[in-house]
Image (cartoon, grey):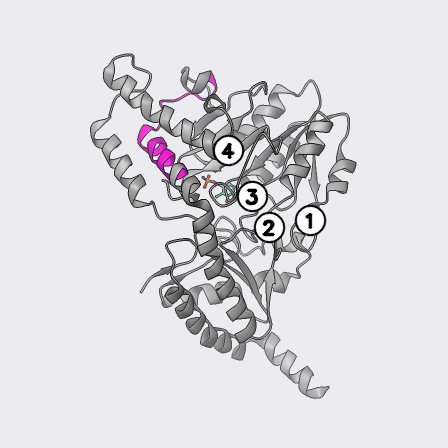
């Protein structure tokens, strides 16, 4: 048995994407910069994918630049804007719950003469618009706030943030890696100047993504080289991966409403069953403003890692926090920023549901989870203390 509930970490490449990629890999080996027939053919795959990316975001296709994924897009957005606008100012605003691709890039810039404000979030993981407005100074050049959080699924008030940045003439970047294909996005209506997306979170391949850069925004290249991507991102384009990304974006856009309604139904059933049938559990994040497939739950008195390992033995795959942080023993910076205690953060796991999952799988997970939680609590000194205190009352 294998039940995959870690779709926020990565997704399985979908069949239609795979077919396209194999076709391009096998038969369309031209270099898209070559002027002869097979080169032009290869370029047409890039054009198609660029078109699809522009459709899902409501921008122009010439505003899309392909990259090696979410991390590169984030690095490029932050460093590229910082470098280009440093004469205007050296201040950047972001939040405490960003992905490390943003946080570590900002920390790098802090070592290089930039000043960064990391906004707090409330207990649901949302930034405060008042705090954002207060943080703006004459030297602020960039605001980077993620669209939806990868650990707890909270969706930020992106349109309102865009209004504030526009009013103050500040560039607005959003890491929308978790949001693209899950939430309707309109970069025009939301006043988004730059946006990062990644292929492998939406059923395309790993190692491909894109950065949207609004026309008129200047940006320094991150990767210098040839004249590819309108001279802004050197290197021969990863044609098979990009062609696959195009297919993934098209299918995500066409079926978004239906897919997300289905995913939400499964997720709600999972969450409600856990909260009702397993005592001492809490749903983290926002009840309303969250990704359809995300369920981040704290199980009091036990360690998320232990739950993960016991579920793994049953062929059920979930995660503790984010895949990047779960290699370390540090509790999630996201949950701590939301005011969770260390032991609560340690006791949290994330389920991320996808349209490939079935209700049957969800029911199996709930049945497998119950004895695992009881067993871990029986061995937990924290739980023992709790029961003793309860009896003493
Ligand atoms: C996965 C993820 C990234 C990194 O994307 P990669 O393509 O894996 O480099 C960045 N931001 C968020 C919110 C993510 O979930």
User: Going from the N terminus, do you reach mark 3 or mark 2 first?
Assistant: 3
Q: CA distance from mark 3 to mark 2?
A: 13 Å
Evaluate whether residue 312 shows in this view: no
Q: Nearer the viewer, mark 4 or mark 3?
A: 4
Q: Position of residue 211 (x, y in %)?
A: 49, 30
Q: Is residue 386 above or below residue 168?
A: below
Instruction: Check whether the beta carbons of the residues at disc 2 and disc 1 lie within 8 A of each other.
Output: yes
Question: Mark 2 or 1 closer to N-term?
Answer: 1
- Real-space CA distance between mark 1 and mark 4, rounded to the nearest whole angstrom: 26 Å
> Along the line of sight, which residue is nearer the eye, 115 or 189?
189
Q: Nearer the viewer, mark 3 or mark 2?
A: 2
Circle 2 residue: 154
Q: Which mark is residue 344?
A: none
Under tag 2, what secondary structure? loop
For label 4, the crowd category at 10 Å Cα-Cα, with few meaning under 14, some 14 to 19 and many 20 or more, is many
Mark 3 vs 2: CB contact within 8 A: no
Q: Earlier in the sequence, mark 4 or mark 3?
A: 4
Name the residue tied to disc 4: 57
Q: Which residues are magenta?
A: 231-249
Quarter of the figure that contains the C terminus: bottom right
**Residue depicted at 49% across the width and 65% down the height:** 269
Residue situated in front as seen by the camera: 12 or 49? 49
Residue 151 in the figure: left or right of residue 159: left
Label 4 – label 3 distance at C-alpha: 21 Å
Task: Determine which residue is flagged by label 1.
Answer: 121
- Confirm or reject: label 3 Cβ below 8 Å from ligand 1: yes
Placement of 323 over or under 302, stated as above or below:
above
Mark 1: give few (<14), some (14-19) or many (20+) Cα within 10 Å.
Answer: some
Mark 3, residues whose alpha carbon is within 10 Å: few (<14), some, or many (≥20)? Answer: many
> Does any portion of residue 50 appear in the rendered image?
yes
């Amino acid at each position: 048995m294998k039940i995959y509930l870690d779709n926020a970490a990565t997704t399985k490449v979908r069949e239609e994407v795979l077919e396209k990629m194999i076709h391009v890999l096998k038969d369309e080996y031209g270099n898209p910069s070559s002027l002869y027939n097979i080169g032009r053919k290869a370029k047409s795959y890039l054009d198609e994918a660029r078109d699809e990316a522009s459709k899902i975001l409501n921008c122009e296709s010439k505003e899309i630049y392909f990259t090696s994924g979410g991390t590169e897009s984030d690095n490029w957005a932050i460093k590229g804007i910082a470098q280009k606008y440093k004469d205007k100012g050296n201040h950047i605003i972001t939040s405490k719950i960003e992905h490390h691709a943003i946080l570590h890039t900002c920390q790098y810039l802090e070592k290089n003469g930039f000043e960064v404000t990391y906004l707090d979030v409330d207990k649901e993981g949302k930034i405060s618009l008042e705090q954002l407005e207060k943080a703006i100074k004459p030297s602020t050049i960039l605001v980077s706030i993620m669209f939806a959080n990868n650990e707890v699924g909270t969706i930020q008030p992106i349109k309102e943030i865009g209004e504030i940045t526009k009013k103050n003439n500040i560039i607005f970047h959003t890491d929308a890696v978790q949001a693209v294909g899950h939430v309707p996005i309109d970069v025009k209506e939301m006043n988004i100047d730059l946006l990062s997306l990644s292929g492998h979170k939406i059923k395309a391949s790993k190692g491909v993504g894109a950065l949207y850069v609004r026309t008129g925004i200047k940006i320094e290249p991150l990767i210098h080289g040839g004249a590819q991507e309108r001279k802004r991102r050197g290197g021969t384009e990863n044609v098979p991966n990009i062609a696959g990304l195009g297919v993934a974006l098209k299918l995500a856009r066409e079926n978004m409403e239906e897919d997300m309604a289905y995913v939400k139904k499964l997720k709600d059933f999972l969450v409600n069953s856990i909260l009702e049938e397993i005592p001492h559990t809490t749903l983290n994040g926002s009840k309303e403003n969250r990704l359809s497939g995300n369920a981040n739950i704290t199980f009091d008195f036990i360690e998320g890692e232990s739950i993960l390992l016991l579920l793994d033995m049953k062929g059920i795959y979930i995660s503790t926090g984010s895949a990047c942080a779960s290699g370390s023993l540090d509790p999630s910076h996201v949950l701590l920023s939301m005011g969770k205690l260390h032991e609560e953060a340690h006791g949290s796991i994330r389920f991320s549901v996808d349209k490939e999952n079935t209700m049957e799988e969800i029911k199996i997970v709930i049945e497998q989870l119950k004895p695992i939680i009881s067993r871990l609590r029986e061995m937990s000194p924290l739980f023992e203390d709790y029961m003793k205190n309860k009896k003493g009352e």
